[in-house]
Image (cartoon, rainbow, N blue to C red):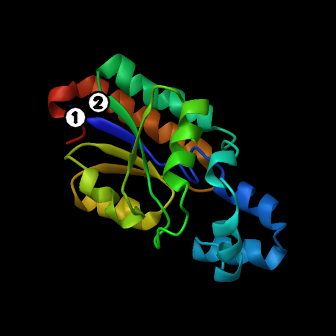
Amino acid sequence: MPTIYLDMDGVLADFNTGARKYLNATEQDEQEAEVNGRWPERSWGRLVEAPNFYRHLPKMPQADLLMLKALRFQDALGWRLRVLTAIPQKNEVPDVFQDKIEWMMEYYPGVVCHFGPYSHDKHRHCKPGDILVDDRTSNCEEWRAAGGHAVKVGSDYSAVLAQLDILFQAVKDKGNSQYLD
Protein backbone atom coordinates (compact mmCIF):
# COMPACT_ATOMS: atom_id res chain seq x y z
CA MET A 1 0.00 0.00 0.00
CA PRO A 2 1.47 3.38 -0.97
CA THR A 3 2.05 6.09 1.63
CA ILE A 4 2.05 9.86 1.59
CA TYR A 5 4.33 11.33 4.27
CA LEU A 6 4.20 14.92 5.54
CA ASP A 7 7.12 16.45 7.37
CA MET A 8 6.31 18.27 10.59
CA ASP A 9 8.75 21.15 11.23
CA GLY A 10 8.54 23.73 8.46
CA VAL A 11 5.65 21.92 6.74
CA LEU A 12 2.88 21.47 9.34
CA ALA A 13 4.46 23.11 12.41
CA ASP A 14 5.93 26.59 12.05
CA PHE A 15 9.37 26.06 13.57
CA ASN A 16 10.81 29.41 12.45
CA THR A 17 7.96 31.48 13.87
CA GLY A 18 8.24 29.58 17.14
CA ALA A 19 12.01 30.11 17.21
CA ARG A 20 11.78 33.81 16.36
CA LYS A 21 9.24 34.34 19.12
CA TYR A 22 11.11 32.36 21.77
CA LEU A 23 14.49 33.85 20.91
CA ASN A 24 13.28 37.37 20.22
CA ALA A 25 15.52 36.87 17.19
CA THR A 26 17.56 39.57 15.58
CA GLU A 27 17.34 40.23 11.87
CA GLN A 28 20.82 38.68 11.52
CA ASP A 29 19.65 35.48 13.26
CA GLU A 30 16.66 35.22 10.94
CA GLN A 31 18.80 35.80 7.85
CA GLU A 32 21.31 33.16 8.95
CA ALA A 33 18.53 30.66 9.59
CA GLU A 34 17.03 31.38 6.17
CA VAL A 35 20.33 31.12 4.29
CA ASN A 36 21.69 28.07 6.13
CA GLY A 37 18.40 26.25 6.65
CA ARG A 38 19.23 26.09 10.37
CA TRP A 39 19.33 28.48 13.25
CA PRO A 40 22.85 29.61 14.26
CA GLU A 41 24.52 27.62 17.05
CA ARG A 42 24.26 30.54 19.48
CA SER A 43 20.47 30.47 19.00
CA TRP A 44 20.14 26.69 18.82
CA GLY A 45 21.67 26.36 22.29
CA ARG A 46 18.85 28.49 23.70
CA LEU A 47 16.16 26.56 21.80
CA VAL A 48 17.47 23.27 23.21
CA GLU A 49 16.85 24.66 26.70
CA ALA A 50 13.30 25.84 25.92
CA PRO A 51 10.77 23.76 27.86
CA ASN A 52 8.54 21.80 25.48
CA PHE A 53 9.55 23.96 22.54
CA TYR A 54 8.21 21.55 19.90
CA ARG A 55 4.92 21.08 21.74
CA HIS A 56 4.08 24.77 21.53
CA LEU A 57 4.90 25.48 17.89
CA PRO A 58 2.15 27.19 15.92
CA LYS A 59 0.75 25.59 12.79
CA MET A 60 1.94 26.75 9.40
CA PRO A 61 -0.67 29.09 7.88
CA GLN A 62 -1.79 26.56 5.24
CA ALA A 63 -1.17 23.36 7.22
CA ASP A 64 -4.85 22.47 7.42
CA LEU A 65 -5.26 22.79 3.67
CA LEU A 66 -2.17 20.64 3.12
CA MET A 67 -3.56 18.02 5.48
CA LEU A 68 -6.87 18.01 3.59
CA LYS A 69 -5.02 17.42 0.32
CA ALA A 70 -3.07 14.55 1.89
CA LEU A 71 -6.24 13.05 3.37
CA ARG A 72 -7.63 12.77 -0.16
CA PHE A 73 -4.90 10.23 -0.95
CA GLN A 74 -6.04 8.22 2.06
CA ASP A 75 -9.80 8.59 1.71
CA ALA A 76 -10.22 8.48 -2.06
CA LEU A 77 -7.29 6.25 -3.06
CA GLY A 78 -6.71 4.05 -0.02
CA TRP A 79 -3.18 5.29 0.66
CA ARG A 80 -1.68 5.47 4.12
CA LEU A 81 -1.10 8.97 5.51
CA ARG A 82 1.77 9.45 7.93
CA VAL A 83 3.74 12.31 9.38
CA LEU A 84 7.47 11.67 9.09
CA THR A 85 9.42 13.95 11.36
CA ALA A 86 12.91 13.99 12.84
CA ILE A 87 14.63 14.68 16.11
CA PRO A 88 17.56 17.09 16.45
CA GLN A 89 20.84 15.68 15.14
CA LYS A 90 22.51 15.42 18.55
CA ASN A 91 19.35 14.13 20.27
CA GLU A 92 19.81 16.88 22.83
CA VAL A 93 16.13 17.76 23.35
CA PRO A 94 14.84 15.24 25.89
CA ASP A 95 11.11 15.82 25.37
CA VAL A 96 11.12 16.11 21.57
CA PHE A 97 9.41 12.75 20.94
CA GLN A 98 6.63 13.43 23.44
CA ASP A 99 6.27 17.06 22.35
CA LYS A 100 5.81 16.14 18.71
CA ILE A 101 3.35 13.34 19.45
CA GLU A 102 1.29 15.66 21.67
CA TRP A 103 1.39 18.37 18.98
CA MET A 104 0.01 15.88 16.46
CA MET A 105 -2.66 14.67 18.89
CA GLU A 106 -3.86 18.25 19.37
CA TYR A 107 -3.89 19.37 15.75
CA TYR A 108 -4.26 16.17 13.72
CA PRO A 109 -5.56 13.37 15.97
CA GLY A 110 -5.57 9.99 14.29
CA VAL A 111 -2.66 10.75 11.95
CA VAL A 112 0.23 8.45 12.82
CA CYS A 113 3.57 10.13 13.58
CA HIS A 114 6.77 8.33 12.54
CA PHE A 115 10.31 9.44 13.36
CA GLY A 116 13.27 9.19 10.95
CA PRO A 117 14.68 9.19 13.65
CA TYR A 118 17.03 11.80 12.16
CA SER A 119 16.38 13.90 9.09
CA HIS A 120 19.01 12.06 7.04
CA ASP A 121 17.20 8.76 7.78
CA LYS A 122 13.88 9.69 6.23
CA HIS A 123 14.60 8.07 2.87
CA ARG A 124 14.78 4.70 4.65
CA HIS A 125 10.99 4.85 5.01
CA CYS A 126 10.48 5.21 1.25
CA LYS A 127 8.97 2.50 -0.92
CA PRO A 128 8.89 3.10 -4.68
CA GLY A 129 6.12 5.53 -5.53
CA ASP A 130 5.62 6.88 -1.99
CA ILE A 131 5.28 10.65 -1.64
CA LEU A 132 7.18 12.89 0.79
CA VAL A 133 6.28 16.54 1.41
CA ASP A 134 9.30 18.14 3.09
CA ASP A 135 11.08 21.48 3.37
CA ARG A 136 14.63 20.12 3.19
CA THR A 137 16.19 19.79 -0.23
CA SER A 138 18.46 16.94 0.90
CA ASN A 139 15.50 14.94 2.21
CA CYS A 140 13.69 15.38 -1.09
CA GLU A 141 16.74 14.39 -3.13
CA GLU A 142 17.37 11.26 -1.02
CA TRP A 143 13.67 10.34 -1.23
CA ARG A 144 13.70 10.56 -5.02
CA ALA A 145 16.89 8.48 -5.15
CA ALA A 146 15.06 5.79 -3.12
CA GLY A 147 12.32 5.65 -5.76
CA GLY A 148 9.73 7.98 -4.27
CA HIS A 149 8.26 11.27 -5.32
CA ALA A 150 9.10 14.35 -3.24
CA VAL A 151 7.37 17.72 -3.06
CA LYS A 152 9.68 20.44 -1.77
CA VAL A 153 8.07 23.03 0.46
CA GLY A 154 9.48 26.50 -0.04
CA SER A 155 8.16 30.01 0.27
CA ASP A 156 5.38 29.35 -2.27
CA TYR A 157 3.07 27.05 -0.31
CA SER A 158 0.41 27.32 -3.03
CA ALA A 159 2.80 25.60 -5.45
CA VAL A 160 3.04 22.65 -3.04
CA LEU A 161 -0.74 22.38 -2.87
CA ALA A 162 -0.94 22.52 -6.68
CA GLN A 163 1.70 19.77 -6.99
CA LEU A 164 -0.31 17.55 -4.65
CA ASP A 165 -3.40 18.12 -6.79
CA ILE A 166 -1.43 17.05 -9.88
CA LEU A 167 -0.05 13.96 -8.14
CA PHE A 168 -3.49 13.03 -6.83
CA GLN A 169 -4.99 13.28 -10.30
CA ALA A 170 -2.12 11.26 -11.82
CA VAL A 171 -2.61 8.47 -9.30
CA LYS A 172 -6.36 8.56 -9.73
CA ASP A 173 -6.06 8.41 -13.53
CA LYS A 174 -3.57 5.53 -13.49
CA GLY A 175 -5.00 3.64 -10.55
CA ASN A 176 -2.95 2.49 -7.58
CA SER A 177 -1.54 -0.50 -9.43
CA GLN A 178 0.79 1.77 -11.40
CA TYR A 179 0.95 4.89 -9.30
CA LEU A 180 3.52 7.52 -10.18
CA ASP A 181 5.73 5.50 -12.54
Give coordinates of residue 102: x percent, y percent: 56, 39
Image position of 143 with respect to 129: above or below: below
Q: Secondary structure at mark 2?
A: helix
**Which of the 4 image quadrants contains residue 175?**
top left
Q: Say which residue appears at 24% left-offset and 34% top-offset.
A: 2
Q: Is residue 173 above or below residue 98?
A: above
Residue 44 in view of the camera = yes
Label 1 secondary element: loop
Point out the tag, 1 or 2, that comes first from the N-terminus: 2
Residue position marked by numbered label 1 in the rendering:
179
Amino acid of disc 1: Tyr
> Is 181 in front, or is 102?
102
Residue where numbered disc 2 is placed: 171
The amino acid type, in three-letter code, at marker 2 is: Val
- Find the distance from the CA under tag 1 to the CA under tag 2: 5 Å
Q: Position of residue 21 (x, y in %)?
A: 81, 59
Query: For this rendering, which residue is in front, 134 or 95?
Result: 95
- Residue 136 lies, in percent from the top left, at 48, 62
- Residue 92 at x, y percent in the picture: 52, 69
Circles 1, 2 touching at the beta carbon (< 8 Å) = yes
